[in-house]
Image: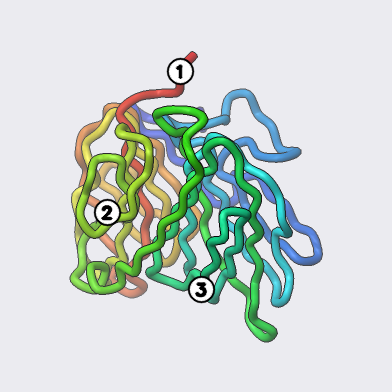
């Protein structure tokens, strides 16, 4: 827990994240990932990975395998090209929700197809309800829903309409492009992970949050999140209702 932990609320600042920087990739990790490991920081609820990646033009993650994981990708700026061994191919752009179910095993690549601009995206992993499922893929443009304001279900294991489906009934990912001064109620769940992807906001009981900051809530009840009056805020909020199996 950090020095800013209070009553089921653990505030993690941007600069506290693990950082990987190589010529083609600038990545910040909210949890232990790759060569970065801290046994006190491996997950929150069912959320195992939340990587904040910036990839240079004409580079990216070349073909590599995954197994038994629900992987959700959310682009903030630019474009990301997805290809996998099941024959799926698409360009992910801001507002297009994408889910890949690795299941029994899948190989995929994620590349920046642009020659002129970086791509900035958040990739998040949660475990599936059942292991060894058939690999799957889904993408859905939800820009229309986001434009209406408030929080919108991006990925859901509970059958929310206008959300991509994930094979994890105890998890929902909410997103919002909150206008300057707009307020929203953070879900009330056993585990909540709130990440400020862009802009700034104020969370009730936590104070100001800046881009890259996160708050981990544990049975903390619903709280009001208010976007900064000047910048607004784009936020990603996971609610999960159980922890990982011991």
**Picture disc at residue 245:** 1
* Colour theme: rainbow
Q: Residue furthest right?
A: 23
Q: Is residue 163 above or below residue 77?
A: above
Query: Nearer the viewer's eye, disc 1 or disc 3?
Result: 1
Residue at 65% in and 72% down: 112
How many other residues sit within 10 Å of disc 1, few (<14), some (14-19) or many (≥20)? Answer: few
In the displayed structure, 51 sits above or below 176; it is above
Q: Picture coordinates of residue 139 (x, y %)?
A: 40, 62
Where is mark 2, residue-wise?
Answer: 153
Gap between marks 1 and 3 measured at Cα: 35 Å
Please identify the residue farthest to the bottom as the structure is shown: 116
In the image, residue 37 sits, relative to residue 210, either above or below, namely above
Foreground of the two, 2 or 134: 134
**Residue shown at the point (24%, 59%) measured from the top left:** 162
Distance from disc 3 to disc 2, alpha carbons, whole Å, reads 20 Å
Disc 2 versus disc 1: distance between alpha carbons? Answer: 25 Å
Numbered label tally:
3
Measured as percent of width and height from the top left, residue 215 is found at 40, 42
First in residue order: circle 1 vs circle 3:
3
User: Dividing the picture into quarters, in which one does residue 154 lie?
Assistant: bottom left
Residue 77 tag number? 3
Circle 3: element type: strand
Q: Tell me residue 65's x, y (percent).
A: 67, 45
Q: Residues within 10 Å of mark 2 (few under 14, many from 20)?
A: many
Front-lying residue, 22 or 246: 246
Circle 1: element type: loop
Decide if residue 62 is in sight here: yes
Examine the rendered structure and indicate whether residue 160 appears above or below residue 39: below
Circles 1, 3 touching at the beta carbon (< 8 Å): no
Q: Nearer the viewer, mark 3 or mark 2?
A: 2
């Amino acid at each position: 827990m950090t020095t800013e932990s209070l009553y089921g609320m653990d505030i993690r600042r941007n600069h506290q994240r693990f950082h990987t920087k190589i010529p083609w990739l600038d990545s910040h990790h909210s949890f232990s990932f790759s060569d970065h490991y801290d046994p006190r920081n491996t997950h929150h609820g069912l959320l195992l990975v939340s990587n904040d990646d910036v990839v240079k033009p004409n580079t990216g993650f070349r073909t590599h395998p995954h197994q038994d994981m629900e992987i959700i990708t959310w682009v903030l700026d630019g474009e990301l090209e997805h290809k996998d061994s099941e024959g799926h191919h698409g360009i992910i752009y801001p507002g297009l929700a994408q889910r890949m179910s690795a299941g029994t095993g899948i190989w995929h690549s994620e590349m920046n197809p642009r020659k002129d601009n970086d791509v900035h995206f958040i990739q998040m992993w949660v475990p599936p309800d059942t292991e060894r499922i058939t690999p799957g893929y889904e993408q859905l443009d939800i820009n229309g829903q986001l434009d209406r304001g408030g929080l919108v279900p991006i990925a859901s294991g509970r059958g929310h309409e206008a959300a991509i489906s994930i094979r994890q009934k105890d998890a929902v990912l909410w997103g919002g492009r909150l206008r300057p001064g707009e307020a929203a109620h953070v879900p009330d769940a056993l585990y909540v992970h709130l990440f400020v992807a862009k802009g700034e906001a104020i969370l009730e009981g936590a104070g100001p949050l800046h881009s890259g900051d996160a708050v981990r809530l544990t049975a903390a009840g619903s709280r009001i999140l208010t976007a900064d009056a000047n910048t607004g805020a784009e936020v990603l909020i996971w609610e999960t209702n159980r922890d990982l199996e011991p």
